[in-house]
Image (spheres, rainbow, N blue to C red):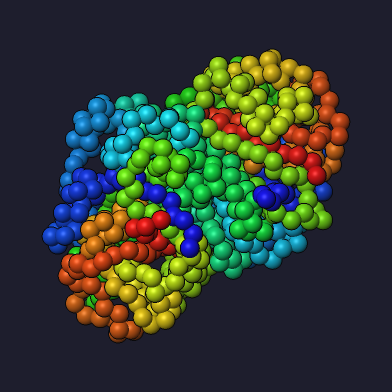
Amino acid sequence: MKKEVYINSIGSVSVQKTFDSTQFLEDIVTYNDTTLKVVDPNYKEYIPPAAARRMAKGIKMSAVSSKNAMKEAGLQNVDAIIVGTGLGCLGDSEKFVSDIIKNDEQYLTPTRFIQSSHNTVAGSIALDMGCKGYNFTYVNTSISFESSLWDAKLQLQANEATHILVGGVDEMVDHHVDTHRFIGHVKDKPVAMEEVLSSHTKGAVIGEGSHFFVLSNKKGKSTYSKLTALNIYNTLKKENIAEVITGFLKDNHLLLKDIDGVILGNNGDIEYDHFYTDLCSSIFENTPQLVFKHLSGEFDTATGFGFWLANKIFKTGIVPEIVKLNDKNITEPKRLLLYNQYRGRNHSLVLLEKC
Amino acid sequence: MNRGIAITGMGLISSIGNNVEENLASLTSNKTGISRITQINTVHKNDIMVGEISQTNDMLEKKLGLAPNSYSRTPLLGIVAAKEAIAQAGISNIKDCKTGLISGTTVGGMDKSEQYFYDYFESDDHWNHINGLHAGDSTQKIADALGLTESFVTTISTACSSSANAIMLGARMIKAGELDRVIVGGSDCLSKFTINGFKTLMILSDTYNTPFDENRKGLNLGEAAAFLVLESDEIVLRENKKVLAYVKGYGNANDAFHQTASSENGDGAVLAMEKAFQTAGIEPSDIDYINAHGTATPNNDLSEGRSLIRIFNGNVPEFSSTKAFTGHTLAAAGSVEAIYSVLALQNNIIYPNLGFKTPMSEFDLVPETILKHKEINTVLSNSFGFGGNCSTLIFTKEA
């Protein structure tokens, strides 16, 4: 008998003031830009200042979001730590490369290289917590976080672990943004938050963030929801996506009408948002549609924000106006479906249920 | 005992051979792949030695029917190895059952990113490499080359244990019935990034690396790609497949001691090996050969040696590190050595630990120094990495 998988706590550092768990998108940070930085929490409350000085931003953000998740779950340690990240602590990687070039491979120091290792966040959390359990890092663009969820689900269902800390983290770094703007992945001109999803221009607004969750196969006092199913696909034919989604629901003995809301990964890129808008006007026509990337920005693990959003909705029963894409209202949501892809690749479906 | 997961195909390119057969020939004839670096123009070229694959990117691209300078070297090597594995497994239609791909990499497309880091701002000649910096991009290119669509494809990056963890995840996926077949392994090429990174850590040897030797001077970086095909019992039965060996046990733990160094007593390694024995349902005394991580850094070999003494209660079976042949191939090391472990099972051989002369002063562990023929039924392979990542795999002849 497979065990259930519960989301027992959440922690977030994002472009919005999500690190304060008492708030729920009440005080929105607006912008008119092509890149977004996280709202810095007071890192001193979480990290000794001496250590924080040389610490990569991804590690710092994750120290806060992971500690908040652990605190809410009432845990000191976990059986496993699983992190997804598209690019790791990219800021340090890019500084190390530029130092290699500028200094002709001389006078380099190891810190930036060490923090460049993609698994540096998972490693530093383990080190800080003294967690000797299973430790994994997934790095597969927009399904990095979902790969981590998958792995956690596999272990919790089989009762190989009881509590697992799962997260997603990525940094917004100038060189990366500049070069990706060349190839049309980043918007050319600043766009206001209210207009990004209807901008009709190429590319996305790039953000950053760190989201951590404690997943357990035991329900706790703070339980938010239940992870019922997920799937990832490296590619999907566009004309098959609706069928894949209904098939995914069918595998879980559900019909479209059983879904109380769908959280979509629209990012305002005219070249790829049709993956979502086509579904909105077909299979999801009568489903409340929610969006979040105008608030979080786009990054490989932006779906961590979407997952956070879904869980906040389950917990509070509130759907903030700013995330509604259509005029269908959600009352007492029982099931929320998340669908995401990036540039037509790496699709994910995540199904959460109230419990 | 728990049933193992069948391995039905293997593919490998390293500094000691362009395919599995050539690798075996080098391993059994003391032919090291360690040399001076020729394909990267680094200021350190006279201070370091590396395990470099002789084929240039141009040669690899020609072989794969790609235009010059289309891909980073990481996916090029990965495609060569993955295709060999698929061919050996006799797979003509990769989509005839639920197939996945799990690849490990640390370098990804960094070789091209470091080359064109500022050039991108001058001209659009090499913009095709911009998105290659994503580690997942190399996996995507391998998946595309194999014709794998609408499938479970992901990438693991746990430093030098990445591909060992890819094998572990693949075995778990098949065991859980999530996939029928999975191609698992890893790929990493040499780059200025890793050469300089390891240089700052002062763990690069200026001569041939000598694992477990008292006078070891550090590691030689290497490059490689290695993939294995794992298949469910149903597929093996249905297609009457030849099984090369089985993934019998696996264990993953974190040392939680230091970002880059291993703990003095190898706590993480001990935990990983314990878990692997548990999943395999076997005892340490069942192990016939250990393919050690053995990087030849002062820290690794001491920590790993102590962990072996602890787990085997002082009675350590025959062991060797093959890194004196290949260099440390980072993310690919786990799958390279997984294939060497399977070859050890198939050929009943133990590889020599090249360069070993003097036992370490801390203990009396002596690796095998000449090729040994012996009935081998069970092999244990260790892979450790930055971030405290420790992984152990156990391979067996019988399920």
Q: Which quarter of the picture shows residue B342?
A: bottom left
Q: Is residue B158 above or below residue A26?
A: below
Give coordinates of residue B93: x percent, y percent. 37, 29
Image coordinates of residue A31 in percent, x first then y, are: 68, 32
Q: A198 or B121: nearer the eye? A: A198
Is B4 situated above or below B67? below
Quadrant in which the C terminus of chain A appears = top right
Residue B399 seen by the camera: yes
Query: Which quarter of the picture shows residue A197?
Result: top right
Count of labels shown?
Answer: 0
Residue B64 appears left or right of B36: right
Look at 29% across and 59% down and name the residue there: B345
**Residue nearer the viewer, A152 or A135:** A152
Decide: is A17 above or below B209: above
Query: Quick check: A11 above or below A179?
Result: below
Q: Nearer the viewer, residue B137 or B229?
A: B229
Position of residue A166 in the picture relative to residue A138 (left or right): right
**Identity of the residue drawn at 30% across and 84% down:** B364
The image position of residue B79, as x and y in percent, is 31, 37
Question: Can residue A265 be seen from the camera position used here?
Answer: no
